[in-house]
Image (spheres, coloured by chain):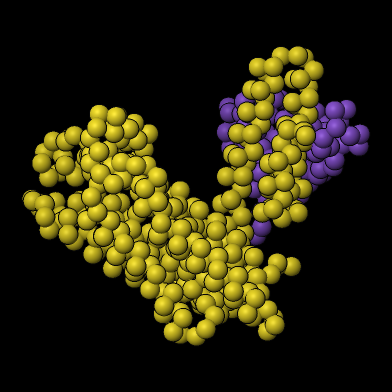
Chain colours: A yellow, B purple
């Protein structure tokens, strides 16, 4: 198999024929030609380096292309849907304001702000993002997808937005929050403090957890291992809730079923609060920590897949189905 | 009453596109990696194809697949060359730039 063939097959699943023609195929063709040329010279290390550079170029090209694709999709969005999109944006904005206010009010009340309220609000805002962002996305998708046929284009747009928000959430949890936490400490206490478990890199957190487990400190190890897996699970929540929001718009069976399904995100929040009351030593077993952190996401993903499939089957006879855009 | 004239779709030429047009004028048909190599690290292989696609949409360049399949198999490479319009845009851009900042050209 020629190098790049698997990447090309993967790209073919998600990219249009035109994108394959002007972006993916020229890139893969150049990668294969360069690989052949370097292979003929008989230098294995150069051969591997060329492949790595080619694969990096592929992912860079794809990541450069995604914003272009989003802009094009937005500019060609049907005019009849503009009102729905505006409604979705308005609902998302209200959700963002309410969620941020609720999440920021508590910490702000508990610190001696000393007249730095505005600055502390700015610093505490990123801390609320990992929770508010998935909620905002969920509300925006539910509003934006109402009365819209569930086409592959809509599904693709939700996936792209969900993935982008997930990347943003991951960056916020791992880089932005630790930085602003220190800034809050400096503003409130006048000096930097030691970093907490949620403020170190995932790798450092896991290494520390495993070291504690080896030392027989099951409670502390469990706490850190759960924290480590929660960092990944919470970062993945925007994508999960975006897809769930899409599924909410096509729940078959009327309002009762919609209300029942719509209560699942609230169960998610209750579950997360309940997780705090479970003994941490249980999570020193990594499988248990993974299951505990990912269970809500898995349930929501499975529910979304089941709802979309059921809706597609139930309404296929009425001409409603997940279909390809022409 | 004077009304603001509707914005005309004047062709734009960002520096990277100007560089690609310049390289293609010198070297006739070139493929993506050739352009990256000829640019002396000013073009990156991860972004050059997006730029080439955009330039093709603007009508500055045209492309075709190489006629002979590569010796080792695999996909045929895509070769790019400038259009008359692309050459005119580059000439106009160079002329304007020379008028505005002669010492920079």
> Residue A90, how many percent across, how many down?
40, 72
Instruction: Say above or below: A59 vs A88.
Output: above
Q: Quadrant of residue B5?
A: bottom right
Is residue B21 in view from this perspective?
no
Residue found at the far right of this picture: B68
| Residue at point 58%, 50% (across, down) | A66
Which quadrant is home to the C terminus of chain A? bottom right
Residue A27: x and y in percent read 72, 38
- Is residue B60 or residue A169 the one in the foreground? A169
Is B70 displayed left or right of A233 in the figure?
right
Q: Is residue A319 visible?
A: yes
Q: Which image quarter holds the N terminus of chain A?
A: top right
Q: Residue furthest top?
A: A42
The foreground one among A289 and A149 is: A289
- Residue A264, x across and y down, in percent: 39, 69
**Image quadrant where residue B34 sits:** top right
Task: Give the residue displayed 44% in from the left and 84% down from the top.
Answer: A256
Residue drawn at x 51%, y 58% is A161
Instruction: Please name whichever residue, A28 or B19, is drawn nearer the observer in this view of the structure.
Output: A28
């Amino acid at each position: 198999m020629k190098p790049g063939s698997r990447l090309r097959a993967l790209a073919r699943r998600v990219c249009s024929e035109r994108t394959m023609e002007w972006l993916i195929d020229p890139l893969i063709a150049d990668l294969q030609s360069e690989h052949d040329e370097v292979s003929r010279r008989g230098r294995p290390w150069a051969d591997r380096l060329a492949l790595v550079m080619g694969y990096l170029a592929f992912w860079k090209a794809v990541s450069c292309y995604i914003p272009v694709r989003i802009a094009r999709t937005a500019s060609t969005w049907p005019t009849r849907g503009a009102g729905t999109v505006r409604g979705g944006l308005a609902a998302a904005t209200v959700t963002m304001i309410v969620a941020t206010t609720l999440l920021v009010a508590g910490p702000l009340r508990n610190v001696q702000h000393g007249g730095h309220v505005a600055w502390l609000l700015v610093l505490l805002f990123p801390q609320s993002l990992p929770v508010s962002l998935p909620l905002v996305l969920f509300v925006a998708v539910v509003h934006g997808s109402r009365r819209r046929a569930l086409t592959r284009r809509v599904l693709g747009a939700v996936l792209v937005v969900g993935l982008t928000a997930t990347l943003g959430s991951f960056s916020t949890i791992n880089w932005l929050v630790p930085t602003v936490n220190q800034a809050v400490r400096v503003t409130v206490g006048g000096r930097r403090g030691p970093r907490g478990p949620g403020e170190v890199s995932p790798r450092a957190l896991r290494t520390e957890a495993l070291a504690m487990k080896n030392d027989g400190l099951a409670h502390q190890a469990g706490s850190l291992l759960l924290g480590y897996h929660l960092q990944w699970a919470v970062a993945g929540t925007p994508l999960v809730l975006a897809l769930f929001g899409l599924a909410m718009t096509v729940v078959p069976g009327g309002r009762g079923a919609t209300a029942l399904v719509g209560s699942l995100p609230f169960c998610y929040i209750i579950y997360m609060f309940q997780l705090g009351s479970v003994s941490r030593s249980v999570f020193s077993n990594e499988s248990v920590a993974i299951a505990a952190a990912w269970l809500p996401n898995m349930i929501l993903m499975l529910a979304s897949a089941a709802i979309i499939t059921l809706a597609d089957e139930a309404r296929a006879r009425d001409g409603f189905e997940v279909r390809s855009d022409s | 009453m004077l009304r603001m004239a509707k914005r005309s779709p004047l062709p734009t030429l960002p520096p990277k596109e100007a560089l690609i047009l310049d390289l293609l004028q010198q070297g006739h048909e070139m493929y993506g990696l050739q352009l990256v190599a000829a640019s002396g690290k000013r073009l990156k292989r991860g972004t050059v194809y997006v730029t080439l696609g955009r330039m093709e949409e603007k009508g500055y360049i045209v492309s075709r697949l190489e006629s002979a399949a590569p010796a080792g198999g695999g996909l045929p490479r895509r070769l790019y060359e400038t259009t008359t319009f692309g050459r005119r845009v580059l000439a106009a851009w160079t002329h304007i730039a020379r008028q505005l900042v002669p010492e920079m050209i």
